[in-house]
Amino acid sequence: MKFKVSEDVQTPSCPLITDQSVLQNIGNTPLIRIQNLGREFKDVEIYAKAEWKNAGGSVKSRPALRMIEDGEKSGRLTKDKIILDSTSGNTGIAYALIGKVKGYKVKLVMPANVCKERKGIMADFYGAEIITSSPFEGSDGAILLARKIFKENPDLYFMPDQYNNDSNWKAHYETTAKEIWEQTEGRITHFLAGIGTGGTIMGNTRRLKDYNKNIQCLAVEPSEELHGIEGLKHMASSIVPGIYKEEELDGKISVSTEASYEMVKRLEDEEGILVGHSAAAAMWAALDLASRIDKGVIVTIFPDSCEKCYINFGKFKEYQASTPHTLPKADCS
Ligand SMILES: Cc1ncc(COP(=O)(O)O)c(C=O)c1O
């Protein structure tokens, strides 16, 4: 079954006009009903937050804006400072967009294998400076390099440090979770989100449990250390973010790279939605959960679309087989 991709939910959101009004298009994203996948689970409804509708094109615009504005309020971010952070892409696009709107220089450290489309948006659209770290060290390599650059010249930079900044999860506590609660009219029973920095899962979990402590909140994580699900972290083999508190969650669901890549295709074919691999991993986890409960209202997060930007599964397998201890190199052509 092939569905027409809905224009309404597919519009990419990396605006060229960067006046202050752009920032109003962060938050208040649509909640979409998954219509066909999981239809066999009669008493389970599945919904996804279409986070690519944020200005900046991803869920990360929410915490980026909050971290920058909290930096301004605290006096740590002043006009003479450069915003510096490590990012695998989406946070970088958000920093670059917000920096351009607010008049800050932005320096971003990311693994060299982040695709050229994303780097292009950050550097060419919004004028951010990009520093690349080793593609073989993934996001951890970028974190360490950003820390080194900061330490060499601390007065020059404002480093939000999204992995350890409470404003990251608070953005979700105050916006995303509130929207989900209102959009489901309080009917949500289960929440699922992938873990990168942990901001999305922690902020939503805390607020949703404030609303109703019985809501089950589960993290979605890659099942393998060497994986191809861009944006997500395999916690056992990564630097664990300071803001991630696994003990507050009700559990985790592991998703293989292969399953998430297949789900990208199924979401396109069966729902008419083009999303990235972390959204597809969340969808896979939602179906897995749906198969294990009698009834419920599951809400998950689709962090981005960025369909042009990902390596395909064949390429991932090829790299994995030839260089088992290194990360795959993104081929974005
Ligand atoms: C595509 C994608 N999915 C999921 C996430 C995870 O979000 P969080 O950092 O809030 O855990 C990220 C984070 O960068 C991402 O880029």
Image (cartoon, rainbow, N blue to C red):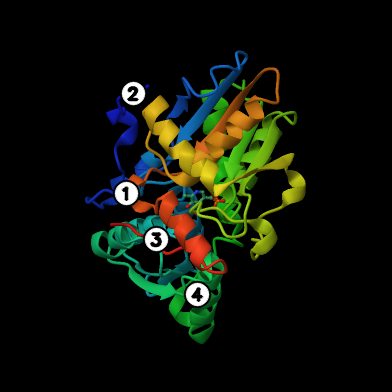
Q: Nearer the viewer, residue 137 or 314?
A: 314
Residue beneath disc 3: 330
Res. 237 image quadrant: bottom right
Image point (28%, 57%), residue name: 333
**In the image, the residue with mark 4 has its CB under 8 Å from the nearest atom of ligand 1:** no
Mark 3: which amino acid? Ala
Residue at the far bottom in the pictured view: 152
Q: In the rendering, which numbered label is found on residue 308? A: 1
Q: What is the secondary structure assignment of the residue under circle 2?
A: loop
The disc, 2 or 3, on the residue closer to the chain's N-terminal end is: 2
Mark 1 → mark 2, Cα distance in angstroms: 19 Å
Quadrant in which the N terminus appears = top left
**Counting residues from the N terminus, which is met first, the one under dot 4 or under dot 3?**
4
Asked whether, in this view, residue 69 is left or right of residue 164, the answer is left
The residue wearing badge 2 is: 3
Residue that lies at the very extreme toward the top in this rendered image: 42
Residue mark closest to the camera, 4 vs 1? 1
Q: Which residue is mark 4?
A: 146
